[in-house]
Image (tube, rainbow, N blue to C red):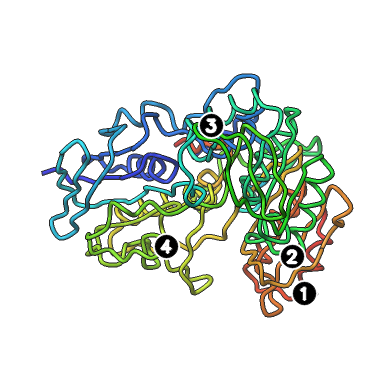
Amino acid sequence: MKIEVDLALCEDQAVCIGLAPSIFAFGEDGVLTVLHESPPEELREACEQAEAACPMAAIRLVE
Amino acid sequence: MRPHIAVVGASLGGSRTVRALRRRGFDGHVTLIGAEPHLPYDRPPLSKGFLTAEEATPKHLEAGDLFDSVETRLNVRAVALRPADREIETDDGDRIRVDHVVVATGVAARRLPGDSPRTGVHTLRTLDDAEAVRRGLANTERVVIVGAGFIGCEVAAAARHLGVDVVMVDPQAAPVVRGVGAEVGAAFADLHRGHGVDLRLRTSVTRVEGFDRVRAVQLSDGSRITTDMLIVGIGADPQTGWLAGSGLTLNNGVVCDSHCRAVGGGGHVWAVGDVARWHSVRYDELLRLEHWTNAAEQGAHVAASILAGDAATPYDPLPYAWSDQYGSKFQILGRTQPDYETEVLSGSFQESRYLVGFFKSGVLHGVLGRSMPTLVARYRSLLTEPADHARAREGALMAT
């Protein structure tokens, strides 16, 4: 499982940060950062929730 | 025979259902029925950036190849559902036999009571509506917006951005009262007045003048406003007319159990999105949310539940919604009923950033943040704790 974020779509709503704080964070430059691009399987559910809930549909899980 | 799942309604909830079915490996037949002529598109921008952007380009949901992998029937309405026969009837005379049906027919914008259709009077729900509003705003000097809910407020902000005079009329004492109550509503009143909106509160439209096109409106405060454009944003009703006689329980939406199975549907009728009124375990009441995020999550959840059979779990999200007005992003996480007690937990209404907590019986149930996305995100854990006032205040000390 790999996480892709389209930063051109991201509007900094931080929904993903709330749902999966160990995966997503704002960097020091204020831009969304993916902390683990290939997260372990036990975080799949949180990653799927973040993907589904992203208001801009900017997050994609790729197998 | 290959199993067949039909999804009635081709907006966010419907398209996310279809996406999740295919992603989870369902290789049976899927039929997606959409009343509009367009492939699924994103609605939130229609009352926001779509109205002010240089070019009116709808944002489509999903890549087109998803809809090639299913039988996508646009410009078609379902007109009847017979759960016992597992059959849907469409307005082009077809009868479709299915194993499961997902009802995702959404809501329809409410019109002014007794108003006849005339040029210049708009509601805003569909892409076609938004294109008409966009054209109207480009060609008017003054718009009257009826209803100061979130849609009305967003359209007011867009109109002011375009330099159009705005009169916004609402019978309540403040904007967005039904969503967030009078105290927070007062901050929205200040916001809109500060941007030049002529806000008429505790006021209603008593008469629309003009035969084939609107010329003026009369208000309950005795005033008369000359205008050639009226936008009505007074709420929306679940589109359940086609389900009359189906045996489903219809009461302000399709009433469902905690798994989003429709009551009276025999276990193979489901509902998602704005039309679904399901039993929320978290709040122990029937909830119907007209929020983007709910439709997205509910569609994905129901698709998984259909495929999981007995292993399905209740759908129990923490509600989330957002609104863009005058360059600020407002975010609501959890529940914010008008009768809840409120407390400003960070910033103040005099500033352009703040966070308000909503408490029911002393327990934090929701937050509304203005331009504080990181803090809103961090309240997600506090909203499931449960947190009292003191704990909620501590939460605001988390770094932003």
- Amino acid on which the number 3 mark rests in the picture: Arg
Depth check, mark 4 against mark 1: the one in front is: 4
* Type of amino acid under label 2: Gly
Q: In the displayed structure, does residue B74 sit left or right of residue B214? A: left
Distance (Cα) linking label 2 and label 3: 45 Å
Q: Residue at x 30, y 42 (%)?
A: B25
Task: Give the x, y percent position of residue B204.
Answer: 64, 54
- Nearest the camera: B88 or B17? B88
Q: Earlier in the sequence, mark 2 or mark 3?
A: 3
Observer-side mark, 4 or 3, equals 3
Q: Are marks 4 and 3 in contact (CB under 8 Å)?
A: no
Does any portion of residue A21 appear in the rendered image? no
Residue corresponding to mark 3: B213
In the image, is residue B112 above or below residue B343?
A: above
Q: Secondary structure at mark 3?
A: loop
* Mark 4 or mark 2: whose residue is earlier in sequence: 4
- Disc on the earlier residue, 1 or 2: 2
Provide the chain ID for the residue under circle 3: B
> Which image quarter: residue B384?
bottom right
Q: Is residue A42 left or right of residue B71?
A: right
- On residue B252, the disc is 4
| Circle nearer the viewer, 2 or 3 | 3
Q: Secondary structure at mark 1?
A: helix
Distance of label 3 from label 1 (alpha carbons): 53 Å
The disc, 4 or 3, on the residue closer to the chain's N-terminal end is 3
Numbered tag placed on residue B389 in the rendering: 1
Task: Please name the amino acid that badge 1 sits on.
Answer: His
Residue at x-position 81% and y-position 46%: B193
Q: Which residue is most to the right? A: B350
